Image (spheres, rainbow, N blue to C red):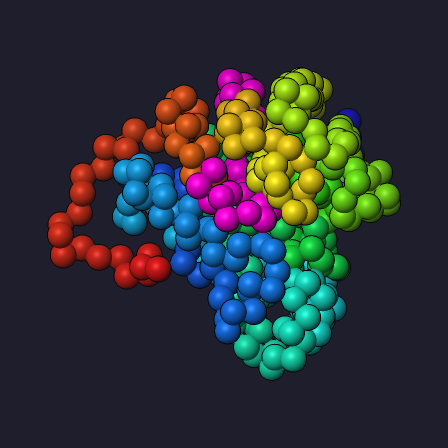
């Protein structure tokens, strides 16, 4: 008999994150609010804080999506965040020096916190709302992609590594609490860095199986969090396509067969790209595209819902690669949405201003 988890009895709060979407919308989530920019401070971190808008733009230019056929993310509220985060942690974010440490941009410590909330943390809350919604859409449509999110270094009571909110943990808890038939989730983390945030959050939760493939020689070196990994694949510096793709293929297949999840969360970081200053691996752009195809192919062939987040990637070329990968998934028939693809164009006067960059 399965042991009852006290989390399943949590009283549900009202939330606007689980919105309904039209059949003519792709389960692809984005908001212009994702992109971070204030006085050039975002340039002090190697992360491209505008890459999400570039991905969205590339997909539009390719003719796959339009403003009216995609889903706009909404901001996660404090009550939404409290499903996982402690009140104490959220209060700590009201001190700019703490946010500076989490984002690894020291000058942020000098800014009034109301500016930090609006220009730094508010975008993160939109990302988080997008990842939470992606869980619902994945169950409804079979798949969903949040063009942002993937803050896998943040846990319930601590942030770090440019991750202020635990969007992956939150999305999984929302699924457990609000979606019928979701009682086991497989978390596949293929970012170059160990996903220590969600690992700490699900340390003793048997409902979540974690597969993590990461470079063992880089941040965060979290030995305690590694105890939560069910399938741990540690890579050496400069691992190449051939070795990497064989490992991803083998272990994804094994994890799915072993755990037989009701849903999959896929953290598709692109910091594995050769030349990435933080990932220190040697995967080509085509290798990343093939990696995503392998994961989606294994999961979709089993009729298991999958949600994807884009996570890390510290080169200007990663936005193009993410878009090319999504386009390839469509070409391979792995992310179908016939009504969205064939949706009639709206009248010329129709203009969704909130999607303007």
In the image, 10 versus 264, the foreground residue is: 264
- Expressed as whole percent of the image width and height from the top left, the position of residue 241 reads 62, 24
Question: In the rendered image, which quarter is residue 268 located in?
Answer: top right
Q: Is there any visible trace of residue 272 in the rendered image?
A: yes
Verify whether residue 306 appears in magenta: yes
Q: Residue at x 75, y 31 (%)?
A: 235
Q: Is residue 311 left or right of residue 324?
A: right
Question: In the rendered image, which quarter is residue 192 located in?
Answer: top right
Verify whether residue 148 appears in magenta: no
Q: Quadrant of the N terminus?
A: top right
Q: Residue at x 35, y 60 (%)?
A: 357
Q: Residue at x 35, y 48 (%)?
A: 57
Note whether 232 is above or below 275 in the view shown: above
Q: Is residue 172 left or right of residue 131?
A: right
How many labels, in total?
Answer: 0
Span highlighted in magenta in the image: 295-321
In the image, 206 versus 62, the foreground residue is: 62
- Expressed as whole percent of the image width and height from the top left, the position of residue 243 reads 68, 21
Q: Residue at x 53, y 66 (%)?
A: 122
Note whether 253 is above or below 354 in the view shown: above
Question: In the rendered image, which quarter is residue 162 located in?
Answer: bottom right
In the image, 328 versus 210, the foreground residue is: 328
Note whether 180 is above or below 294 in the view shown: below
- Expressed as whole percent of the image width and height from the top left, the position of residue 267 reads 60, 39
- Expressed as whole percent of the image width and height from the top left, the position of residue 237 reads 74, 35
Residue located farthest toward the front when viewing the structure as drawn: 275
């Amino acid at each position: 008999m399965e042991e009852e988890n006290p989390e399943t009895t949590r009283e549900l709060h009202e939330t606007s994150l689980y919105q309904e979407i039209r059949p003519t919308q792709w389960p692809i989530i984005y908001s212009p609010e994702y992109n971070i920019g204030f006085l050039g401070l975002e340039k002090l971190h190697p992360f491209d804080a505008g890459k999400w808008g570039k991905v969205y733009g590339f997909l539009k230019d390719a003719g796959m999506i339009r403003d009216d056929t995609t889903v706009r993310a909404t901001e996660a509220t404090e009550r939404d965040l409290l499903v996982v985060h402690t009140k104490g942690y959220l209060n700590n974010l009201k001190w700019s020096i703490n946010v500076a440490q989490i984002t690894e941009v020291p000058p942020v410590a000098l800014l009034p916190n109301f500016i930090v909330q609006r220009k730094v943390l508010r975008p993160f809350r939109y990302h988080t709302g997008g990842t939470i919604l992606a869980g619902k859409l994945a169950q409804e449509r079979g798949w969903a992609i949040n063009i942002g999110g993937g803050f896998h270094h943040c846990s319930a009571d601590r942030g770090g590594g440019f991750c202020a909110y635990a969007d992956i943990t939150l999305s999984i808890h929302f699924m457990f609490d609000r979606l019928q038939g979701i009682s086991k989730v497989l978390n596949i983390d293929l970012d170059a860095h160990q996903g220590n945030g969600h690992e700490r959050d699900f340390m003793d939760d048997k409902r979540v199986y974690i597969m993590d493939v990461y470079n063992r020689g880089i941040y965060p070196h979290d030995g305690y969090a590694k105890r939560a990994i069910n399938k741990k694949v540690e890579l050496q510096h400069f691992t190449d396509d051939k070795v990497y793709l064989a490992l991803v293929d083998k272990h994804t297949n094994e994890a799915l067969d072993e755990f037989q999840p009701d849903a999959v969360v896929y953290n598709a970081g692109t910091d594995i790209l050769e030349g990435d200053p933080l990932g220190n691996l040697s995967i080509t752009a085509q290798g990343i595209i093939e990696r995503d195809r392998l994961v989606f192919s294994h999961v979709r062939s089993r009729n298991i819902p999958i949600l994807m987040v884009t996570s890390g990637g510290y080169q200007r070329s990663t936005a193009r690669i993410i878009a090319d990968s999504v386009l390839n998934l469509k070409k391979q028939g792995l992310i179908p949405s016939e009504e969205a693809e064939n949706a009639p164009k709206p009248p010329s006067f129709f203009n969704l201003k909130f999607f303007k960059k």
